[in-house]
Image (cartoon, rainbow, N blue to C red):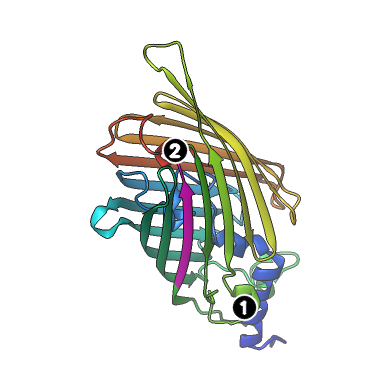
Amino acid sequence: MESMLKPRNFITCLFLFIGVMLPSLLWGQDVIFSQYLENSLSANPAFAGVSGNSETLLAYRQERFGALSQFETFSAVYQQPAEWLHGGFGVMLYRDAATRGFISKNAISVIYAYHLRLSRSWNLSSGFQTTFVQQNLNTNGIILPDMIDPSRGVVLPSSQTINPWSRFYFDFQVGFLMYDKHWFYSISAFHLMEPQMSPVKIPETMQQRRYSFFMGRSFIFDLPSSTFNKLKIVPWAGYFYQAGHALIRAGSSAHVGPLSAGLGWQGSYSRTRHYLISSFAFATKNIRFTYSYSVSPGRTSGGTMNNIHEITLSYFIDRENLLVLPFTINLIGF
């Protein structure tokens, strides 16, 4: 039987289905890590080098484990301060896969931040990021509507042919970070040119700009202990906006010696789903391991839980003191 849809029209409808009926799929491609400040370069390029230490970081993120719309994200980051550049630089490798590899994105970013002392206490970092992106569509194992028999399941051959494709493009980001010994304010804009992510150029496949604002303050208290005599409390709040969706996060973290823990909340104006975010970290002189778990009430349409797992492993070069270093090392992010 000949299909009523022409191949190009069918492909357009497929992307409309992905973009309109499953908006979380494309939204999920632009991942906002729960460990926002632990993986700081993914949030704002202005963080490059502000810690004063060279750092290598590996991160893994998994959302909606077991669901068809499962997301997996991997990132690897290297950053360091560079006095001869009056700032810092970094390199970031990134892979994001949605719906078990049906859509995936590979990217490499080069980052530079210029550091400027505004006054005796305040500093300004201006960050710039250029990203080369490979967006992929993998059609292996795809199930099309005409392959489904109402009584027998997926047993019919399809009259449609959807070829896999890869699209390459450049993307650009900018950010600013203002901070002193205790306060910090972060503002950033991603996808400045709003690139098209697929060969089918429709509004739903355009990577829309993402804007974010984040702030926090650290409080340090003396403890009656000779082993760990300092307690650091860091309340924080953030606002993110992309594609008509506004996201708010707020919480606090606590740090004593090599241990850190935190609790946060995430909510949205346009979506009813909210997340409770918990995080724990253990650090030695040069290594930090961080795990966070986010959970939302209810389940997906497939019956799986709305949860997010994140693991980050950081290695710091020339790290001398857990409590005296600049704030970006000590903040555990969500």
**Amino acid type, label 1:** Ser
Q: Residue at x 69, y 60 (%)?
A: 245
How crowded pointer 2 is (Cα within 10 Å; few <14, some 14-19, many 20+) is rated as few
How crowded pointer 1 is (Cα within 10 Å; few <14, some 14-19, many 20+) is rated as some
Residue 158 tag number: 1
Residue 279 pos. (x, y %): 53, 34
Q: Nearer the viewer, residue 118 or 3?
A: 118
The reply to whether residue 266 is in sight is yes
Q: Nearer the viewer, residue 37 or 8?
A: 37
Residue 132 pos. (x, y %): 40, 70
Magenta residues span 171-181
Q: Quadrant of residue 282?
A: top left
The reply to whether residue 277 is in sight is no
Residue 175 pos. (x, y %): 48, 60
- Residue 5, placed above or below residue 308: below
- Locate the C terminus and report the quarter of the image it occupies: top right
